Image (cartoon, rainbow, N blue to C red):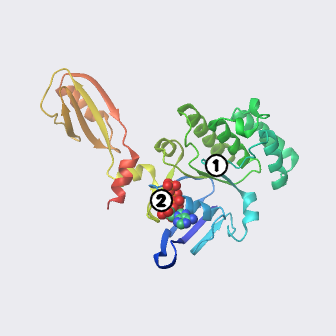
């Protein structure tokens, strides 16, 4: 089932005044469709148009052109109906009430969304347990750490059983452990409830851990839409085999890899991300005295930069 449909979506802003007035095209004729149950990363450099797109999808901004349907609704015209079908989490700000304990914020949301008390209690119990918020329910939001508040925001976004969860930079500012737990939770949510996820992020590990599919946007235009593995391939991404030889040697020469750098006994060989490292490692080990080996995964930001530069 198709949950999000975007055709030639466009949004412009007028900036400046009088003679200095000009138009900025934040989103330029972007088209994509997202099926129920997908986990999609919407990525791109700063100012690419990610937040503007999410704001249009969630009904906060009215498009300047194109067509847009989310859960069968027109977001800006049917914003209230849409609110019942979607959850929204912005990493940089909270939807919770600053002075209220978490528990009271959640209770207010139950009334706003008119979620049945039974369903509300069930969801609350489940999410509070999964996100380990039990001891914090009576703490006012302003006293929570960033990670705790983010978990609270996620519960708040999910209590009314949304089919789609939009997340804008959900792991920003969190420590490594909190990031890992949040990703784990989102994966479980998608697997057990089939919730569709669309997230913007600058964190490459978010993409690796969460996104079956990535849409890359640059200067308002979608420049890639597909699997992460294909993004690596199209961007010409490579993995690196770092070889520590017992002794210094001229650049290693083995089939399937290119030696990029030599520094004393250490050499860096690159090979395509979709190729297996095994034959290369075997060839190196057969021909040279090897003290140690390690493999470095590609940096997605490099891959994306490569795509942009075309
Ligand atoms: N309210 C606004 N008025 C004028 N220009 C805007 C407005 N909102 C966004 N823009 C411009 O539109 C473009 C896209 O901005 P947007 O916030 O969507 O990018 P982004 O991809 O979310 O960036 P970031 O990763 O930095 O959050 C930028 O050039 C931005 O300056």
Quadrant of residue 152 within the rendered picture? top right
Q: Which mark is residue 93?
A: 1
Residue drawn at the location 31% of the way across and 36% of the way down:
277
> Can residue 42 be seen in this snapshot?
no
Location of residue 286 with respect to 297 vertically, above or below: above
Report how far apart the C-alphas of labels 2 and 1 lie in the structure: 18 Å
Neighbourhood count class around disc 2 (C-alpha, 10 Å): few under 14, some 14–19, many 20 upward: few
Q: Is residue 125 left or right of residue 207?
A: right
Q: Is residue 21 left or right of residue 54?
A: left
> Can residue 47 be seen in this snapshot?
yes
> SS of the residue at dot 2?
loop
For this rendering, which residue is in front, 86 or 281? 86
The residue where tag 2 is placed is 47
Residue farthest toward the left in the current orientation of the protein: 250
Q: Which mark is residue 24?
A: none
> SS of the residue at dot 1?
loop
Residue drawn at the location 55% of the way across and 34% of the way down:
175
Residue 294 locus on image (x, y percent): 32, 29
Residue 251 locus on image (x, y percent): 15, 34
Residue farthest toward the front in the current orientation of the protein: 18
Residue 7 locus on image (x, y percent): 55, 71
Residue 218 locus on image (x, y percent): 43, 61
Mark 2: is the Cβ under 8 angstroms from ligand 1?
yes
Residue drawn at the location 54% of the way across and 45% of the way down:
210
Q: Is residue 100 left or right of residue 2?
A: right
For this rendering, which residue is in front, 143 or 194? 143
Q: Earlier in the sequence, mark 2 or mark 1?
A: 2
Residue drawn at the location 79% of the way across and 42% of the way down:
100
């Amino acid at each position: 089932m198709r949950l999000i449909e975007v055709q030639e979506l466009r949004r412009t802003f007028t900036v400046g005044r009088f003679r200095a007035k000009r138009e900025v095209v934040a989103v330029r004729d972007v088209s994509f469709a997202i099926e129920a149950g997908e986990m999609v990363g919407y990525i791109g450099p700063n100012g690419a148009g990610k937040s503007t797109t999410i704001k249009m999808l969630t009904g906060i901004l009215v498009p300047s052109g194109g067509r847009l349907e989310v859960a069968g609704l027109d977001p800006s015209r049917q914003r209230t109906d849409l609110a019942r079908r979607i959850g929204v989490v912005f990493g940089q700000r909270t939807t919770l009430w600053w002075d209220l304990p978490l528990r009271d914020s959640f209770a207010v949301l139950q009334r706003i969304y008119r979620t049945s008390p039974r369903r509300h209690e069930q969801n609350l119990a489940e999410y509070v347990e999964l996100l380990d918020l039990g001891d914090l329910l009576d703490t006012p939001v302003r006293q929570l750490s960033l990670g705790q508040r983010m978990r609270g925001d996620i519960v708040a976004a999910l209590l009314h059983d949304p089919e789609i969860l939009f997340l804008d930079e959900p792991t920003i500012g969190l420590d490594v452990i909190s990031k890992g737990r949040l990703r784990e939770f989102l994966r479980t949510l998608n697997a057990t409830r089939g919730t569709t996820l669309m997230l913007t992020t600058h964190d490459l590990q978010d993409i690796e851990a969460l996104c079956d599919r990535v849409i890359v946007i640059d200067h308002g235009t979608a420049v890639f839409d597909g699997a992460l593995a294909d993004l690596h391939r199209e961007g010409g991404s490579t993995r690196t085999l770092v070889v520590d030889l017992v002794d210094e040697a001229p650049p290693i020469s083995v089939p399937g890899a290119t030696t990029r750098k030599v520094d004393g006994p250490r050499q860096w060989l690159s090979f395509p991300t979709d190729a297996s490292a095994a034959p290369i490692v075997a060839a190196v080990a057969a021909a040279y005295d090897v003290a140690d080996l390690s493999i470095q995964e590609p940096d997605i930001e490099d891959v994306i930069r490569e795509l942009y530069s075309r």
